[in-house]
């Protein structure tokens, strides 16, 4: 994770680049003899969130279409002239910012040329630009269809990928837009404009909730997964209280420094591992009688947490780490929001977690610490393990083992 940050990779960029590694197209063999990269890739790529606001929307399935084109065959002199005249009118209309007239003219050119004609990809590209600029309802979707027909006709022509990326970006399907621009860059690796388009798209993407959520987890991933695995219960839930703002911790450290010159955010964190039964008992009590601070009863979309939905989300979790993060989300207020997620944590992932030195058993009374836990999230059952972290800094977990340190309260 630190290496990815040093290379200026966000969580999403790490996954995209990882999927391009040799052999990654066949997961069965790619993860057969995993290293740290494969373990981290499996975990990050497999993150699942409960809150719909954290799930990135899938781009519309807009297929390329050539139905407007004239029947296949050799273009006649009349067809060639009609197409050329229409293209010239389209170019002039576009220059005059009459995008509707430009779209009509390019449509006429398309219908004049036989299916698969060598000039069609450029006409589709031009009509795509007119539709994208026109601002007409549904224009971006229609433009996307043109871009994909352009790519279908001329897959090695970089401009088609630029058109596709621009359409997807306007539709706010930013992950797919980045992929389109990367495809164009592969065809023109020396053209620096691709890097500008990718960066422009990634800046927009990184400000959206799904990317912020993945980046939050990515930055804490080794600590979160190690603490969950240390709990020793596949049915267990790791609850983490983050005394910091979600939008601050959802930004990659390198991007924060690069864009704002600010140092990475700092916060105190509490880790608590509990059985699933105890988790739901505490959750029910908190929802019924919310603590004054430190505990979330709504998700990032402001929707109240519902036990039935959470229970359904956790069904068949297998070896997935189950994480419940409460984090500030209120523009500088103390309001908390819950982030519930599942992260793959099978043997492939555990290999990259490494080992950690555990703190010694507390020598003094822990009664005051346990009392605080009962009033700040665990009214029905104390966690089996409790730990702390000051970010940026090392994780101390478990500081308290309730069975070891307070067996009468276990």
Image (cartoon, rainbow, N blue to C red):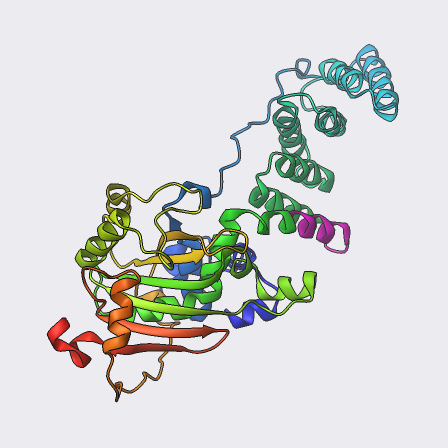
Q: Residue at x 24, y 46 (%)?
A: 311
Which sits in the foreground, 29 or 226?
Answer: 226
Q: Residue at x 40, y 65 (%)?
A: 39
Q: Quadrant of residue 108?
A: top right
Residue 307, given in percent of the width and then of the height, sits at 25, 45
Which sits in the foreground, 403 or 229?
Answer: 403
Query: Is residue 33 something that shows in the picture?
Result: no
Residue 1 sits above or below residue 51 on the image: below
Q: Residue at x 37, y 66 (%)?
A: 224
Residue 272 sits above or below residue 329 on the image: below
Query: Is residue 161 something that shows in the picture?
Result: yes
The image quadrant where one finds the C terminus is bottom left
| Helix, strand or loop for the magenta stretch, by majority | helix
Q: How many marks?
A: 0
Image position of 164 (left or right of 271): right
Q: Which residues are magenta?
A: 188-201
Residue 103, given in percent of the width and then of the height, sits at 75, 19
Which sits in the foreground, 372 or 282?
Answer: 372
Which residue is the extreme one toward the bottom?
363
Image position of 200 (left or right of 221): right
* Residue 193 is one of the magenta-drawn residues: yes
Q: Quadrant of residue 119?
A: top right
Image position of 237 (left or right of 251): left
Residue 271, given in percent of the width and then of the height, sits at 34, 68
Which residue is the extreme one toward the top?
78
Q: Residue at x 64, y 51 (%)?
A: 203
Residue 79 sits above or below residue 21 on the image: above
* Residue 160 is one of the magenta-drawn residues: no
């Amino acid at each position: 994770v630190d290496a990815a940050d040093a290379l200026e990779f966000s969580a999403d960029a790490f996954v995209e680049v990882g999927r391009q590694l040799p052999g990654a197209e066949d997961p069965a063999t790619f993860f057969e003899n995993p290293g740290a990269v494969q373990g981290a890739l499996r975990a990050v790529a497999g993150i699942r969130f409960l809150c719909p606001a954290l799930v990135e929307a899938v781009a519309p399935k807009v297929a390329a279409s050539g139905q407007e084109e004239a029947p296949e065959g050799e273009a006649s002199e009349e067809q060639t002239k009609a197409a050329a005249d229409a293209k010239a009118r389209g170019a002039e209309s576009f220059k005059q910012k009459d995008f509707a007239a430009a779209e009509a003219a390019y449509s006429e050119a398309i219908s004049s040329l036989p299916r698969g004609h060598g000039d069609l990809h450029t006409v589709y590209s031009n009509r795509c630009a007119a539709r994208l600029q026109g601002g007409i309802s549904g224009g971006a979707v229609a433009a996307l269809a043109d871009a994909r027909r352009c790519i279908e006709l001329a897959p090695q022509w970089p401009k088609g990928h630029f058109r596709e990326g621009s359409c997807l970006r306007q539709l706010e399907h930013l992950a797919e837009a980045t992929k389109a621009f990367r495809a164009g860059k592969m065809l023109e690796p020396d053209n620096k404009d691709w890097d500008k388009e990718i960066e422009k798209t990634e800046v927009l993407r990184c400000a959206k909730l799904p990317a912020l959520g993945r980046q939050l987890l990515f930055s804490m991933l080794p600590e979160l997964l190690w603490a969950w695995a240390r709990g020793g219960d596949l049915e267990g839930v790791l609850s983490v209280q983050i005394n910091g703002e979600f939008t601050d911790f959802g930004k990659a450290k390198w991007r924060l420094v690069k864009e704002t010159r600010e140092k990475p955010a700092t916060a105190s964190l509490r880790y608590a591992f509990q059985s699933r039964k105890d988790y739901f008992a505490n959750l029910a009590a908190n929802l019924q009688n919310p603590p004054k601070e430190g505990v979330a009863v709504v998700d990032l979309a402001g929707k109240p947490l519902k036990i039935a939905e959470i229970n359904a989300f956790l069904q068949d979790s297998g070896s997935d780490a189950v994480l419940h993060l409460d984090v500030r989300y209120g523009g500088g207020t103390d309001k908390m929001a819950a982030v519930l997620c599942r992260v793959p944590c099978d043997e492939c992932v555990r290999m990259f977690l490494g080992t950690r030195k555990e703190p010694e058993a507390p020598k003094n009374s822990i009664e005051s610490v346990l009392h605080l836990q009962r009033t700040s999230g665990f009214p029905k059952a104390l966690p089996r393990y409790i730990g702390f972290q000051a970010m940026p800094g090392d994780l101390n977990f478990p500081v308290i083992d309730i069975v070891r340190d307070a067996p009468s309260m276990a």
